[in-house]
Image: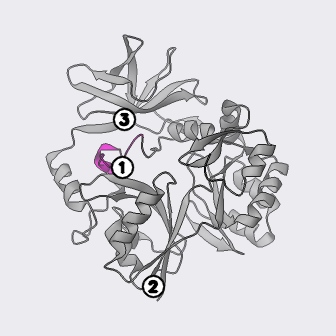
């Protein structure tokens, strides 16, 4: 296949079904995707996410550069370690990628340093775009391919990590606030995730990843693959790049309007003019949640019909193991109300239109 992470041998040893994922040989599941999903919702599961791309942004104008590059504003990061979710847009206001950026230094430090984590499938395009936009700034972009990354998620995730790490790291884990990250003895430990559960994403040297993975296994943390990762993030109402958004989709059409920092008005980030023009004229579509409680599974690309309004399309859909029925994200006409129908096997099946997320901390949260 393609690239392999530092944990590739571990996945083989655990009997994982390995598949190609954006050029990486990654585990789809280790036997039962549904069981892995439930482990994360009820206890703790771990994912090898070392395929993600980590880029450090440093230099005298790192802050100014990121304020130009990103639709959200890194000026809001007022504490060391604070994380920010943002889209990186093209000039037309489409989403090149979504990402998380961490402030690695104190806000007033002389040498600015941020850590950016982007998707692996968009790596080459992202790095090229970031480099092109960096030309006008005194800034250095340094990819960190020598770092592995393990995500431990679930209500018992932090507790299990505390059991197997050093005393100082355990103390950090117990005190770390949500959406913050801190360095500890050569590791970067962040309290973020993609599942709707509490948990950690830990970046560590590749040569330490296998030992840490085995310690987590011994502590009862279940290995989980891409399949469970997808159903968990869908239940949490989190977008998947390339499905729910891409370069032809504005954040205003992808339920990401909250990530657009339009104040102050003089911050001229890439894509701002296009986003403001669309906001002024009004987007024709929006991203919503769909719920199908009768038999059937909602799938990507199925047509959504809204009587008297128009048509849309499912962008992500699956059976929800937590809820016991099918859910989806769909891009539909902006005038869509609380009901719609999905074309399935030649019939129009009624669905409920809701506002994501569907599940948080193991509980149904939509009405």
**Magenta stretch, residue numbers:** 243-257
Picture coordinates of residue 248, whole percent (x, y): 29, 46
Helix, strand or loop under label 1? loop
Vertical placement of 340 versus 11: above or below? above
Give the CA distance from mark 3 to mark 2. Answer: 40 Å
User: Residue 212, located in which quarter of the rendered image?
Assistant: bottom right
Residue 360 in view of the camera: no
Indicate left or right for 136 with 153 as reference. Answer: left
Question: Which of 356 and 217 lies nearest the eye of the viewer?
Answer: 217
Q: Which mark is residue 108?
A: 2
Tell me if residue 248 is in the magenta stretch.
yes
From this view, report whether residue 25 is shown above or below residue 210.
Answer: above
Q: Pointer 3: residues within 10 angstroms few (<14), some, or many (20+)?
A: many
Does the image show residue 212?
yes
x and y percentages locating residue 331 in the rendered image? 33, 35
Q: Quadrant of the N terminus?
A: top right
Q: Is residue 44 left or right of residue 100?
A: right
Say which of 341 and 223 sits in front: 223
Residue where numbered disc 1 is placed: 256
Q: Is there a contact, CB below 8 Å, between mark 3 and mark 2? A: no
Residue 111 coordinates in the image, percent (x, y) = 48, 86
Q: Secondary structure at mark 2?
A: loop
**10 Å crowding of disc 1: few (<14), some (14-19), many (20+):** some
Q: CA separation, marks 1 and 2?
A: 29 Å
């Amino acid at each position: 296949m393609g690239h392999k992470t530092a944990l590739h041998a571990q996945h083989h040893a655990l009997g994982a079904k390995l598949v190609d994922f954006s050029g990486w040989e990654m585990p789809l599941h280790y036997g039962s995707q549904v069981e892995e999903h439930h482990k994360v919702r009820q206890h703790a599961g771990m994912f090898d996410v070392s395929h993600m791309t980590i880029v450090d942004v440093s230099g005298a104008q790192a802050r100014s550069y990121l304020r130009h590059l990103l639709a959200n504003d890194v000026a809001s990061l007022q504490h060391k370690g604070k994380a920010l979710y943002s889209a990186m847009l093209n000039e037309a206001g489409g989403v090149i990628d979504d990402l998380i950026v961490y402030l690695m230094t104190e806000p007033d430090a002389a040498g600015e340093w941020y850590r950016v984590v982007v998707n692996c499938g968009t790596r080459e395009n992202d790095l090229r775009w970031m480099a092109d936009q960096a030309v006008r700034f005194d800034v250095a972009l340094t990819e960190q391919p020598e770092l592995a990354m393990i995500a431990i998620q679930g209500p018992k995730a932090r507790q299990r990590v505390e059991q197997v790490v050093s005393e100082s790291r355990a103390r950090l884990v117990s005190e770390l606030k949500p959406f913050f990250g801190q360095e500890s003895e050569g590791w970067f430990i962040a309290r973020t995730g993609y599942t709707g559960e509490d948990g950690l994403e830990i970046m560590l040297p590749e040569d330490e990843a296998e030992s840490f993975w085995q310690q987590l296994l011994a502590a009862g943390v279940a290995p989980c693959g891409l399949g469970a990762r997808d159903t968990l993030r869908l239940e949490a109402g989190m977008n998947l790049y390339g499905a729910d958004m891409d370069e032809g989709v504005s954040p205003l059409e992808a339920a990401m309007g909250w990530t657009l920092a339009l104040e102050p008005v003089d911050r001229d980030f890439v894509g701002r003019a296009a986003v403001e023009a669309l906001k002024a004229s009004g987007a024709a579509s929006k991203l919503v949640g769909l719920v199908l409680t009768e038999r059937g599974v909602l799938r990507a690309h199925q047509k959504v019909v809204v009587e008297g309004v128009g048509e849309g399309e499912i962008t992500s859909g699956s059976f929800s193991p937590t809820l016991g029925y099918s859910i989806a994200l769909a891009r539909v006409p902006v005038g869509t109300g609380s009901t719609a129908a999905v074309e399935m096997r030649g019939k129009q099946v009624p669905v409920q239109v809701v506002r994501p997320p569907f599940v948080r901390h193991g509980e149904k949260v939509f009405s």
